[in-house]
Image: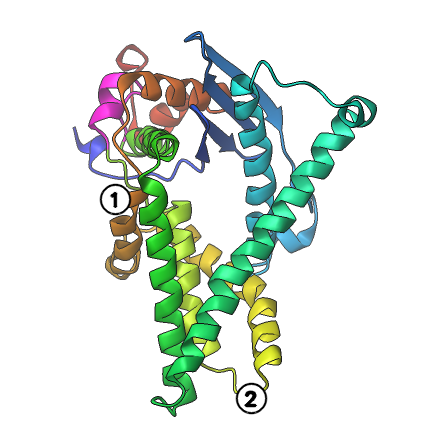
Amino acid sequence: MARRKKTVNSGIGGQAVLEGVMMKNKDFYAVAVRKPDGEIDVETAEYHGILHGSKLTKIPFIRGVFNFADSLILGMRTLDHSASFYEDEGATETKIDKALGDKSQKTFSVLTVLLSFAIAIAIFIVLPYYLSTFLEKYVRNASLLAIFEGLIRLAIFLIYIVAITAMKDIKRLYQYHGAEHKCINCLEKGHNLNVHNVKRSSRYHRRCGTSFLLFVMVISIILFMFITIENPVLKIIVRILLLPVIAGISYEIIKLAGRSDNFIIKILSAPGILLQRLTTKEPDEDMIEVAIKSVEAVFDWKAFLKENFEYEEDEL
């Protein structure tokens, strides 16, 4: 039918977690996890964001910075939740944990995020710049040197992606990532949400976080070309300070890609889609079932299909 030739942005998004999928629709999110006993646990909650209600969240290029921060916070929260089903049963709780309770967990989560951010800066900002300095004897043009620095950064990123793909747990995470994409694509193409239709849907999506990170890499190359500071320390500091700007621009491109079928947008999205061949894998039916449960907990997909694809009640 003609209704299936178009694509309609559903507005929902998510991420893979340990043995499960998180789906978010506006201020509501759900985490569906396949427990060790085979049952699917589904928990729903609200997340309003760090600047809920602020006008800053509506301003283009600025909203992306806070959206990225919210994604990190919510991502860590849902990963912790999914991991709780697979904690070592023999682990003992320390006296400090008992005394601090939830505060201990929150403090640990914050420290984990800060440490991860520091490591990311060291690997993807400081290291590429340091390695590019070895080319200064041969490349006198600062802009060209910035391009080489960006290519080194991109190479490190790709090596990292390929390296972790070999890990068994990461492979399963990528399968759940594929299940998340397949569910969203199934709905946005106008199909009923069931295992059969989801299985046939594409595991690639233009609004994927992988594509976002790739845009971050490319945009950083362009912006860093304009840094003319000579002092090496200041160069690194400016690069770090530009990260919110880069994130804001990347967010707007991803947002545009999600609601446009423009030929130029498709070309810009192509490298990200190609990279998703590494960061998504084909899920099995059990994984698809988990992803469907997560979608259904926060999104009325039947109403979506009726409104956008003119489905009749007996077709759903």
234 left or right of 205 in image? right
Q: Position of residue 18 (x, y in %)?
A: 46, 27
Foreground tag (1 vs 2): 2
* Start-end of magenta stretch: 190-201
Identity, as a three-letter code, of the amino acid under mark 2: Glu
| Neighbours of disc 1 within 10 Å: few (<14), some (14-19), many (20+) | some
Residue at x-position 32% and y-position 16%: 286
Q: Is residue 65 visible?
A: no
Q: For residue 230, which numbered disc appears in the image?
A: 2
Q: For residue 110, which numbered disc appears in the image?
A: none
Residue 111 magenta-drawn?
no
- C-alpha span from label 1 to label 2: 39 Å
Q: Quadrant of the N terminus?
A: top left
Residue at x-position 61% and y-position 73%: 237
Q: Which residue is mark 1?
A: 277
| Neighbours of disc 2 within 10 Å: few (<14), some (14-19), many (20+) | few
Q: Position of residue 127 (x, y in %)?
A: 48, 67
Identity, as a three-letter code, of the amino acid under mark 1: Arg
Q: Quadrant of residue 188?
A: top left
90 left or right of 37 in image? right
> Which residue is at the far left?
1
Q: Secondary structure at mark 1?
A: helix
